Amino acid sequence: MMFQTSVMDLDPQTQSKRLFLLHQNHRQRAESVISSCVSMKSDQSKEHPLVFSNEPGPSDTKERKRRAVSVEEQLSCCSLCQDILKDPVSTSCGHWFCRQCITSYWDQSASSGDSSCPQCAERSRTRPGLQTDSQTSTVQTKTGQQEVLDEHQISLSSTCECVTQGTDEAGSEIPINDIFTELHITEGLSEDVNTQHEVWQLETASKMETLHDTPIKCQDIFKVLPDQQKHIRLKQKHIRSVLTNGVAGVGKTFSVQKFTLDWAVGSENQDISLVVLCPFRGLNSIKDEQYNLIMLIQECHPTLQKLTAEKLAVCKVLFIFDGLDESRLSLDFNTSEVVTDVTQKTSVSVLLTNLIKGNLLPSALIWITSRPAAANQIPPSCVDRVTEVRGFTDAQKEEYFRKRFSDEEQSSRIISHIKTSRSLHIMCHIPVFCWITATVLDHMLTTDQRGELPKTLTDMYSHFLLVQTKRKKNKYDGGHETSPQELTEADRKLLLKLGRLAFEQLQEGNIMFYQEDLKQCGLDVTEAAVLSGFCTQIFKTENVIFQKTVYSFVHLSVQEFLAAVYMYHCYTSRNTKVLKDFLGEDYRYSSLDDFLKRAMEKSLQSKYGHLDLFVRFLHGLSLESNQSVLGDLLGQTENSPETIQRVINNLKEMNSE
């Protein structure tokens, strides 16, 4: 039922690759099978990174020498006599021999004063202890558990190793390690809820350098670093729960994916036995169901069907709840029932609140990601560390565009152009907006469309809409060329349906939608399928853990822009029902400046400013320069110089109040 797959469900080539990686991982792990705890993953994989990481290996060289070998190999034959094991015993490194063979081997080499393993040459000043055959059944039990955890790691690795970038065709994926750029993550965010729109938060964050801002790497968020101990709220030197904030599209989910992949391939955080990935967008689809914690874990990851409460109790588990802002669950931290038993059934919301509070499986680590406005759902007492993803620094912005455009002259021109526009430069802190900007400017600089480059957000998004619509035509409509600024009637209908969806969900504060949401806006399943194909750039889909398709725009600002296009069209087409639903029953169709003033007043009523950029786009669309780009999609308005001046006067007046 889930997106996680068994290794045996993979195609032969992928299966062979996964098994090879797993075999390599086993050969490099640090702890022996015998000396590991019940959760062998936590001990065996503690030390050795795989080739996927450029980070240096661990400093504990003694532990790094130890090797784990499979029980099948251990119990099949003796590497000394090459015969079936007789009275089998194991060395401390985990290799198995006949008792007589290994004893004779050590007796013959006793003159050197050292005892070593004949197979891996691990040395010891004293003769290592031997594991007897009477303990073989225990080893086999642990190995069964190890196989479950290994298959889970393979599944997570397969899920997280690739990403689809904005302009890529559906199914075209890029290894995350090929494109990953370390994002600017800081520790010590203020506990106050930021009620600004996220665009303004970006500007504030880019200027603000406080004493409490400590750069931290994604893989270190659960580690207490020496210069960061003063920020840990708990007296004990232990970080159990982390809350990571960041505006939409800044790279929170990307960081989760990279963290999970690094764990799955054995290169980071190998003290963690089990990582359970639970995106809120997936949990939404089972919010009315009854689960216990074991069932929920197995629902998220079918590879863990053999996981038991006893095994879970001795594992060091990390739960990752990504996208709190996308949650449609009711998290009640005050009156929710207390659950302490991992086998007790209750609602998903109650399970999560008890996990986060530490009532349920108190040894588990918790990582929650969220946009700023939703982060206050988690009580400060439940969070040990707060981090913030701030996206690209100014230097990383330039690095992105220089990598994106091999022509140095072209990349320099684009970077210079972005620096001349305050709005564009601020938005380029967001990696996705860098891609949007690159998409538009690349098209304009490499085609006959060599007019003035966009300087405002509205202008940039207007051109972005046209570029992506043209790409849709080339793919689905036989590649018939039209003017870059010509929209067909079918294009307009589809974009207005998207705009309605964007607007209605923006009002609800949703950035993730489901098929029923599309149907309410007149988008049928066939159109949705086309959207998921050509609008990976504008509108993307993903099959989450419960195999329920989830839709979203590639970035919140794209949703806000399309919502503004839809609302502006409603004004020009005199759709009074939509206008009254938005602006109030007392609204009467009037001049453009009055309409924009009412929209601004509506946005100011929002506690978290979620309509701010939407209203900014509305004002931008009133300009003749932007209307000429989108043409009939917006409809006709009278935007005389006098009207525009009244709009400006209204904005000045409201700004001074």
Image (spheres, rainbow, N blue to C red):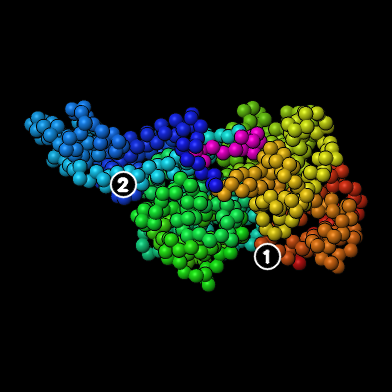
Specify the segment rendered in magenta. Answer: 158-171
The residue that disc 2 covers is 141
Residue closer to the observer: 241 or 441: 241
As measured in the structure, the alpha-carbon distance from the residue carrying label 2 to the one carrying label 1 is 56 Å
Q: Position of residue 624 (x, y in %)?
A: 86, 45
Prevailing secondary structure class for the magenta stretch in the rendered image: loop
- Place of residue 561 in the rendered image (x, y in percent of width and height, measured from the top left): 74, 49
- Who's the residue at 77% across and 63% down the image? 602
User: Looking at this view, is 640 or 87 the one in front?
Assistant: 87
Residue contact between numbered discs 2 and 1, judged by CB atoms under 8 Å: no
Residue at the left extreme of this rendering: 111
Residue 396 lies in the magenta-colored region: no
SS of the residue under disc 1? loop
Three-letter amino acid code at the position of disc 2: Thr
Amino acid under disc 1: Lys
Image quarter for residue 262?
Answer: top left
User: Is residue 162 shown in magenta?
Assistant: yes
Tell which tag, 2 or 1, sits nearer the viewer. 2
Percent position of residue 91, x then y: 20, 39
Instruction: Reply above or below: 114 against 234.
Output: above
Determine which residue is flagged by label 1. Answer: 607
Residue farthest along the bottom direction in this orientation: 335
Q: What is the number of callouts on the image?
A: 2
- Specify which label sits upstream in the sequence, 2 or 1: 2
Task: Name the residue nearer the viewer: 8 or 332.
Answer: 8
Residue name at image x 90 percent, y 60 percent: 590
Which of the 4 quarters of the picture holds residue 26?
top left
Numbered mark located on residue 508 in the image: none
x, y percentage for residue 581? Answer: 81, 62
Residue at image point 46% right, 38% down: 7
